[in-house]
Amino acid sequence: MKMKLEFPAKIIRKPIVSEICLNTGVLINLERVNIEATWATMIVDVEEKIEEVTRAFEEKGVEVEILEEPIRRDDGRCVHCGICSSICAMGVFSFGEDYKVEMDPSRCIVCKNCIELCPTGALEIY
Amino acid sequence: MNKSIEEINEKIRTGTVRVVTAEEMPNIVKDVGTKEAVKEVDVVTTGTFGVMCSSGAFLNFGHSDPPIKMRKVFLNGVEAYTGIAAVDAYIGAAQTSKSRGMEYGGGYVIEDMISRREIEVKAESYGTDCYPLRNLETSITIDDLNQAVMLNPRNGYQRHDAATNSKKDAIYTYMGPLFPHFGNVSYSGSGLLSPLSNDPTYKTTGMGTRIFLGGAKGYIIGEGTQHDPDNGHGTLMVKGNLKEMDPDFIRGATIYRYGVSIYIGLGVPIPILNEDIAKSTSIEDKEIVTNLVDYGVQRREKPVLRKVTYEELKSGCIEFNGKEIKTFPMSSYHKAREVAEKLKEWIEKGDFELSMPVERLPVKGRMKNMRQTKIKPPVKHLMAKEVISANQEISIEEAAKVLIENEIDHLPIVLTDNKVVGIITSWDISKSVARGKFKRVSEIMTKKVVSVEPEDLADVAARKLEKYNISAMPVINKDGEIVGVISSGDLSKLIGKW
């Protein structure tokens, strides 16, 4: 399950992810990390004890958002060209039956590269 | 056995016509041979759904009161060409929005029109005795127009080069993003479904051929611009009634960092009149060959790296220099199939009859290059040839001294074999002095050096300086050695001179 974590300024410098790994015994895979002077966001992948990990982060003051489907497609605009597949390093997009572009949103790490690349503006990150 | 168009149209009227798509035809010909195929199959439908910039529409707005002779007109902020009569205009698919840039443009206006959305119209004029109105603002839908005629000067390329990039920087082209060091390959066209690949000598395709265009009936009105039959790059000029088109088969598009355009669904029916035509419509992806071209070379003549078939391109990866390179399409094969299937359905239902061209497309001729009376010189004639460089072990003070003594702002850092490993500017030195903790140039130099080749033209160098927001860069030859430095100052000397 992918999660979006937002760290407020006062706790940025603390090793919160490591602490939670140790305390819960759950492996947390960092897929995208953005640390600035006054804020930080991370996209992480957690495979077990989702509720416990979520609670642990929230107790430390981190805002947690569960990304069930981080990327969405407007099927009315998609023309199934497949340009998205050229830029996605995670393999979210692939050609399926009848040469339609199929999506596996669970692989998405919200890099947003495909959003700008899509010629018809059919993709959206939330 | 030979058939005539009239016989086929009679079958369409009586509901006994046999129509297949160009995807189905190869197996039929394989199974029964061309002779039997002529008896069994009456029409083969083709289809393509790709980005076709050379597209647009003529619009007639009707007269306002008092009347206006539109000198400029904007549709949802996108300028349409009005150098024709008072309230006629041509909206081009590749025209970008005045305020929204590449986010919106002519292709989107056309899609919005077909979708029956309101379009904001702003027009201006100088005013005449017969057309006194000088400014106009209104809102229209396609149904308010007298005519809305799609007229595309160049659609349906017989085949298109596949693109890759040999250089060290990613480039963003009309063939999509091309990653450095042959990182990917893009291609366009539907291969065995492509209209002109199924009629490569234009036996039944020409002026007056009724076709599928954007979900409506349309016509081929002649050879497309840049029609290049000698090189197997035929093109079509087509027209159709925009008011009858379907947004399912027309879509505004933005090609990232390139511009706006439009996706167009186009299908040509091919009557199976004789064995020759049966044979040409049985073409398969493995028989359709195109060139893999290096778009990294920003010149008109781009190196052809190898021949490649549509079978390879569609497989998702091709081999080049012993490496597998991922391919991706610019056009939609899924939608191309929909076009061919839809056209098949129309013919079977008796809604679409075939027409023989009144004139075939030219089978001979080639595309010309532009005659240019002035060409700006290559970088090698403009650059500073006396290269002042330094090695990476020198101190920042020493580097500063070299810059001052030679009155330069850029110092390439090289190895003993003249290979560039970095570059230092006076600004880098100021920054390091202000921070005060660095000693060697290797610690502060920019390691990802933007460079050009000696043969690159001045405009290519200028575009690079602008793209990376820098004022000079080293000129590096094919062997990776520095041979000069080119600056914006060197390039600005061209102003007025060329």
Image: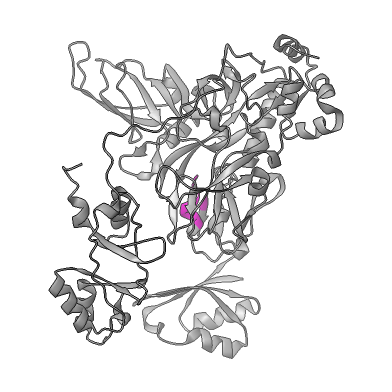
Q: Residue at x 51, y 22 (%)?
A: B223
Q: Residue at x 37, y 69 (%)?
A: B448
Is residue B395 shown above or below A126?
A: below
Name the foreground residue: B67 vs A50: B67
Q: Residue at x 55, y 71 (%)?
A: A3
**In the rendered image, which quarter is residue B105 located in?**
top left
Residue B185 among magenta residues: no
Is residue B159 shown above or below A102?
A: above
Whether residue B239 is visible: no
Residue A117 among magenta residues: yes
Residue A112 in picture, x, y percent from top left: 48, 60
Name the foreground residue: B435 vs A36: B435
**Magenta residues (range):** A114-123
Residue B296 in picture, x, y percent from top left: 44, 53
Query: So how many labels did they put on this image?
Result: 0
Which corner quadrant holds the N terminus of chain B?
Answer: top right
Residue A72 in picture, x, y percent from top left: 56, 55
Name the foreground residue: B427 vs B62: B427
Q: Is residue B76 left or right of residue A21?
A: left
**In the rendered image, which quarter is residue B400 located in?**
bottom left
Residue B36 in picture, x, y percent from top left: 85, 23
Q: Is residue B233 left or right of residue B399?
A: right
Q: Is residue B3 left or right of residue B72?
A: right
Whether residue B134 is visible: yes
